[in-house]
Amino acid sequence: MEIALFIILIPFLVLATIFSKGKGAVLIAGYNTMSDSEKSQYDEVALCKFTGKIMYGVSFCILLLAIAELLNLHLLMIIAVILLIIIITVALIYTKTGNRFKTK
């Protein structure tokens, strides 16, 4: 199981790196289905960079899960899951409030 988590971690880190450079917007769900006129209303680079930060956080949680599985540490697994839930919740609240990625 821990090997699978380490294998899953690699694409997450690659995507996080791509997003952190402000590229790869076509890979962001929802954004890639917008029309060109809708996409022009958003700051694509800022959206990608934010997504990259979230991907790094998720990658860290996956790494913690893999280490917890490898060392059989149930407390670390619980911490990783709680941290993952917090990261996703904060990301959803942050993106859905304040039109943060809309261009002015």
Image (tube, rainbow, N blue to C red):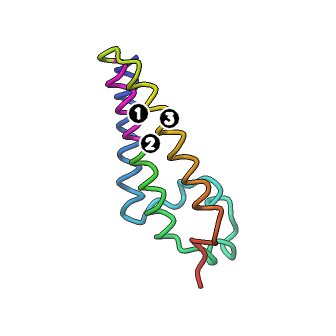
Q: Is residue 68 magenta?
A: yes
Residue beneath label 1, please? 62
x, y (%) of residue 8? 41, 32
Question: What amino acid is found at the position of numbered circle 2 in the picture?
Answer: Val
The quarter of the picture where the N terminus appears is top left
Instruction: Identify the residue position indicated by label 3 in the image.
Output: 82
Give the class, few, some or many, for how many residues have Cα within 10 Å of label 2's Cα (few <14, many ≥20).
many
For the point 35% across and 33% down, the residue is 63
Residue 26 found in image quarter? bottom right
Distance between the Cα atoms at labels 2 and 3? 11 Å
User: Cβ–Cβ below 8 Å for labels 2 and 3?
Assistant: no
| Residue type marked 1 | Ile
In the image, residue 90 lies at what x, y percent?
Answer: 55, 52
Of mark 3 and mark 1, the one earlier in the sequence is 1
In this rendering, the answer to whether 31 lies above or below 66 is below
How far across and down, in percent of the image, does residue 100 sit?
58, 71
The residues bearing labels 3 and 1 have C-alpha atoms spaced at a distance of: 12 Å
Question: Badge 1 local density, few (<14 within 10 Å), some, or many (20+)?
Answer: many
Residue 81's place in the image compared with 98, above or below, is above
